[in-house]
Image: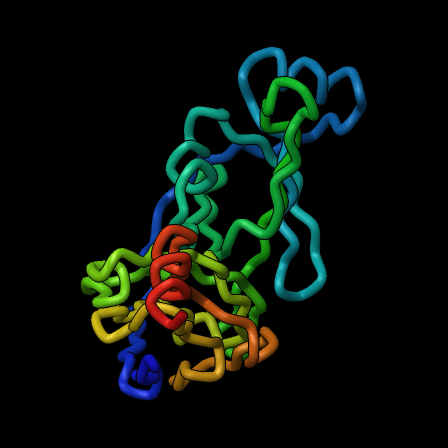
């Protein structure tokens, strides 16, 4: 029978990193202008201001590779023609066939207003269950949290160095500091599954 070491698993977080993105204001919001921007390699975007305002702009698509094609989440310093906005990438829409970025939404941050965002999970350590032949299964790659901008973590680190075979670590094991978790506490973050071959051997030994 396997012992459950989940209560001893260490979960930590660090502050969110910041990346700068350059944009340009849009005056013409017509379909023709939007199509032309995309043909020129730009992404039409909208910044939802903290006071309910909307800012229409565009950004060269190449600049998005650092914040979209990565498991990390960044706080964005948006520079639109010299006007700076503190924000996060809220949503990205892709072409259904080519995966071309069609549109992005940014959410402006306010020091006094909480924001909801998904934070990536990062595993550290060597699981004894894996070393014994089990397979580590990542069940939850990101965890949705609510926090003031200055309390947003860069990632949530999960130490699996005591995770045994057949056991899992759940969201409820996280002790949040400065943020609220918006995910069902019973959802597993990761587990170590027993391979079929090993289960067969255990069954044979029990007989």
Q: Residue at x 19, y 64 (%)?
A: 125
In this rendering, the answer to whether 107 lies above or below 97 is below
User: Visible in this render: residue 98?
Assistant: yes
Could you say which quadrant of the image residue 116 lies in?
Answer: bottom right
Which residue appears at 45% of the width and 62% of the height?
A: 119
Residue 188 location, x and y as percent?
Answer: 50, 70
Number of callouts: 0
Which residue is at the front of the view, 188 or 99? 188
The quarter of the image holding the N terminus is bottom left
User: Which residue lies most toward the front here?
Assistant: 207
45 to the left or right of 137: right
**Which residue is nearer to you in this view: 23 or 129?**
129
Coordinates of residue 106 in the picture (x, y in percent): 58, 49
* Left or right, residue 83 beside residue 183: left
Q: Visible in this render: residue 155?
A: no
Expressed as whole percent of the image width and height from the top left, the position of residue 155 reads 35, 63
- The C terminus, quarter of image: bottom left
Horizontal side, residue 44 vs residue 16: left or right? right
Front-most of residues 99 and 27 = 99
Q: Residue at x 35, y 57 (%)?
A: 198
Does 196 sit above or below residue 114?
Answer: above
Query: Which scheme is used to colour this image of the protein?
Result: rainbow
- At 39% across and 73% down in the image, what residue appears? 167
**97 displayed left or right of 107:** right
91 lies above or below 163: above
Q: Nearer the viewer, residue 7 or 200?
A: 200
């Amino acid at each position: 029978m396997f012992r459950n070491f989940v209560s001893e698993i260490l979960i930590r977080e660090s502050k969110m990193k910041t990346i700068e993105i350059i944009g340009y204001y849009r005056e013409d919001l017509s379909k023709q202008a939007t199509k032309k921007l995309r043909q020129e390699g730009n992404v039409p975007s909208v910044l939802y201001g903290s006071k309910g305002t909307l800012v229409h702009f565009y950004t060269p698509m190449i600049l998005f590779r650092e914040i979209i094609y990565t498991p990390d989440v960044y706080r964005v310093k948006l520079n639109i023609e010299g006007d700076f906005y503190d924000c996060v990438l809220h949503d990205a829409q892709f072409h259904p066939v080519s995966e071309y970025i069609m549109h992005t939404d940014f959410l402006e941050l306010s020091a006094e207003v909480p924001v909801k965002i998904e934070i990536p999970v990062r595993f550290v350590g060597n699981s004894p269950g894996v070393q014994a032949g089990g397979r580590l299964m990542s069940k939850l790659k990101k965890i949705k949290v609510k926090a003031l901008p200055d309390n947003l973590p860069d990632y949530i680190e999960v130490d699996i160095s005591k995770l045994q075979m057949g056991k899992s670590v759940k969201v409820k094991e996280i002790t949040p500091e400065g943020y609220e978790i918006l995910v069902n506490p019973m959802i597993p973050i990761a587990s170590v599954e027993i391979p079929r071959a090993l289960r067969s051997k255990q069954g044979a030994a029990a007989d």
